[in-house]
Amino acid sequence: MEKTKPDPLKSYVIVGGGTAGWISAAVLSRALTNTKSNITIIESPNVPTIGVGEATIPSIIDLLEYLRIPLKEFILATNATFKLGIKFIDWQKKGHHYWNPFGGIGNKIDGKPFYQHFLKHQFEQNKYNFTDFSPAAALAKENKFYLPNPNVKNNLSSSSYALHFDASLVAKYLTKYCKNKGVNLIKGHVESTELNQKGHIDKLIFNDGEKLTGDFFIDCSGQKALLIHKSLRVGYEDWQHFLPVNKAVTAQTNTELSIPPYTQATAHEHGWRWKIPLQNRIGNGYVYCSDYCSNDEALTLLKKNCSSFITEPKFLSFTTGKRDKIWHKNCLAVGLSSGFLEPLESTSIYLIMKTMLNFVQNMPNKSFDQPPIDEFNRLIDNEYHTIRDFIVLHYCTSKRTDSAFWQMWHHIDIPKTLQTKIELFKCQGKLYENHYDLFSADSWYCVLEGMGVRPQSYDPLIDASNFKKIEQAFVSSVTELSKSIGKTLSHDEFISKLRIS
Ligand SMILES: Cc1cc2nc3c(=O)[nH]c(=O)nc-3n(C[C@H](O)[C@H](O)[C@H](O)COP(=O)(O)OP(=O)(O)OC[C@H]3O[C@@H](n4cnc5c(N)ncnc54)[C@H](O)[C@@H]3O)c2cc1C
């Protein structure tokens, strides 16, 4: 094969200045440091950003590290709080709650997963819940926070955390970050595009007639999908038959006495309601299905369950699904233009980050070779499918029958891949191996356990371990965890200390 030197792209153009646009610009500017490529981002003065997207998962910390953004500075600039996981209320049945905490739960015993030993414990004694062994859940229940230190090993080390933040302040912070890295900002409204002979995007045409050329275009224009769909005609795989919620009403309220270090997700008659605590306010939203609930009913429910709104309520619509190809020709779709999985597990910002980090690992040349593009699309497809399955799991295992919405979940066809995972789990509590699954085995166990899905048996080799000793270890583990939590700061104290240190 003939050897050719890389022929790098010179200009990257990002359309859209929402969370997707600014994260894309930040990742690109970091990846292209010391190269001759330039980056331009375009924000329309006429189209606002979606204004939601304020809960994250622990990979947000990896993103900050990649961008070399100091955690403390970011937290103070974005009114952020810590998130140790999600408290799911009324999902299995009314009056019941469970946790899906971040981080690990228990260690392997005699080479077998902790969960298998826990299962045997449940068969014999049923004294504990699986999340009783989770440091993050133990902290969250007490409104405490502990920042794990990789150099200090203790029984809170396997705790992990993410952030809740103000989306508009994040965009502001990243704007400054990107400007310092030489990203050009254009305030303009893109009207259409011109394609070249290969069907690649050649130019953007603005509503004042101005034109802008580029080598590569990143579509962060939100649900409009201006480039990937309107210009390149890439289709959309609709997953509403798996996840029928399609609307949300949102509003902000004042902070309460203390700031919980977790997101709250409460199931209601026609969907579920989030509560995301920031330092200075709370973000609230009710996600529902328009076949069962009108906008007025949704607003009434949100009002009934919140203190007085400090912002006007806002209605949003969405179609759960995924773009057929996230990268097509010289265009990459990032954020809402690429697809949307409802916000139950706070995965959209993760997908933005993952799309961009995968992209910079497959940086194209001017030749736009197809194999790296195909591999990129395969990996991102995989992410979407596993996240979709995990979200459907929360609904399809509910025992609720108190409304037409919940009754529907007892008859709905779930993805075959999820069906297989649940069937496998029900035998001996084993999980389907998928190295690309964003959610760890412990997360799957937490939701399955939390929703009351129980295996018929456990791994027969567990009986080879000394059960009495393991039971004693369980008791001391829970006692020691509780002692350690007693010594940690409250979440409020931790944030106040950050402000003054
Ligand atoms: C109800 C709901 C709750 C959510 N909650 C979460 C959550 O908790 N966690 C999470 O990770 N994600 C969440 N998300 C998803 C998250 O909000 C988005 O992934 C994220 O905000 C990225 O949006 P975006 O930048 O793609 O689009 P937008 O914010 O819509 O930005 C689009 C940008 O494109 C620009 N634009 C549009 N048209 C033009 C044009 N013609 N010319 C030039 N510019 C143009 C606009 O000016 C704007 O700057 C939620 C989404 C919804 C719907």
Image (tube, grey):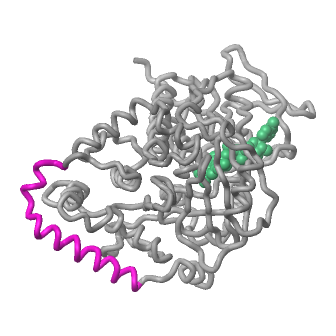
Residue range in magenta is 458-487
Name the side, left or right, on which 193 lies relative to 492. right
Name the side, left or right, on which 391 lies relative to 8. left
On whether residue 414 falls in the magenta region, the answer is: no
Determine if residue 181 is in view: no
Q: Indicate the quadrant where residue 148 lies.
A: bottom left
Q: Residue furthest front?
A: 402
Q: Position of residue 174 (x, y in %)?
A: 68, 57
Name the side, left or right, on which 131 lies relative to 60. left
- Residue occupying the point 40% across, 84% down: 486
Determine if residue 96 is in view: yes
Q: Position of residue 240 (x, y in %)?
A: 59, 33
- Relative depth, front residue between 270 and 359: 270
Q: Indicate the quadrant where residue 449 lies.
A: bottom left
Q: Quadrant of the N terminus?
A: top left
Q: Position of residue 88 (x, y in %)?
A: 50, 58
- Residue occupying the point 49% across, 62% down: 95
Q: Quadrant of the C terminus?
A: bottom right
Q: Residue furthest right?
A: 208
- Above or below, comparing residue 395 to residue 132 in the picture: above
State the predominant SS element of the stretch in magenta.
helix
- Relative depth, front residue between 496 and 265: 265
- Above or below, comparing residue 393 to residue 68 in the picture: above
* Count of number-bearing discs: 0
On whether residue 478 falls in the magenta region, the answer is: yes
- Residue occupying the point 55% across, 50% down: 344
Q: Position of residue 271 (x, y in %)?
A: 60, 48
- Relative depth, front residue between 65 and 448: 448
